[in-house]
Image (cartoon, grey):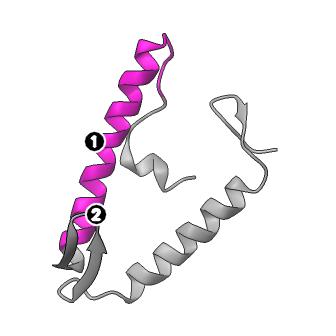
Amino acid sequence: APTLLGHRLPQGLQALWQAVAQKRRGWLEGARPESRVFYHHSSGSAANRVDEIVLHFTSHTHFHRGQLAAQFRLLGLTPPSAHWIGFFRL
């Protein structure tokens, strides 16, 4: 069974992650950086270019990985690497 930090992953989680990653990859391969995407969020609606959304996504995930690393350390644990490139290897 797949593991993460020595813990078994819930059954089906790795397959689900791979399906999401494949869908994301397919969308990104066909997306034009300058095209606009219209979407809804918790505060209303917005439109941004694809390149802006990708930049936001990558920088915002670092924010949350930093939060998780701090929580790990508060619990006396060593957090996994927060290097972005490592997430492409999952």
Q: Is residue 5 above or below residue 88?
A: above
Rendering coords of residue 60 (x, y %)? 27, 51
- In this picture, residue 11 sits left or right of residue 82: right
Point out the residue furthest to the top here.
76
Classify 10 Å Cα crowding around label 2: few (below 14), some (14-19), many (20 and above): few
Pointer 1 or 2: first along the chain: 2
Q: Which residue is labeled 2 in the image?
A: 42
Task: Report helix, strand or loop for mark 2.
Answer: loop
Q: Is residue 40 above or below residue 90?
A: below
Rendering coords of residue 64 (x, y %)? 34, 41
Q: Main secondary structure of the magenta part?
A: helix
- In this picture, residue 8 sits left or right of residue 45: right
- Let me know if residue 53 is in the magenta part: yes
Q: Nearer the viewer, mark 1 or mark 2?
A: 2
- Let me know if residue 67 is in the magenta part: yes
- In this picture, residue 43 sits left or right of residue 28: left
Classify 10 Å Cα crowding around label 1: few (below 14), some (14-19), many (20 and above): few
Q: Nearer the viewer, residue 44 or 87?
A: 44
Tag count in the figure?
2
Q: Quadrant of the N terminus?
A: top right
Q: Which residue is labeled 1 in the image?
A: 63
Q: Amino acid at mark 2?
A: Ser
Task: Report helix, strand or loop for mark 1.
Answer: helix
Q: Amino acid at mark 1?
A: Phe
Q: Is residue 69 above or below residue 27?
A: above
Choose top left, top right, bottom left or bottom right for residue 16.
bottom right
- In this picture, residue 15 sits left or right of residue 57: right
Rendering coords of residue 15 (x, y %)? 71, 62
Q: Residue at x 37, y 41 (%)?
A: 83
* Magenta part of the chain: 52-79
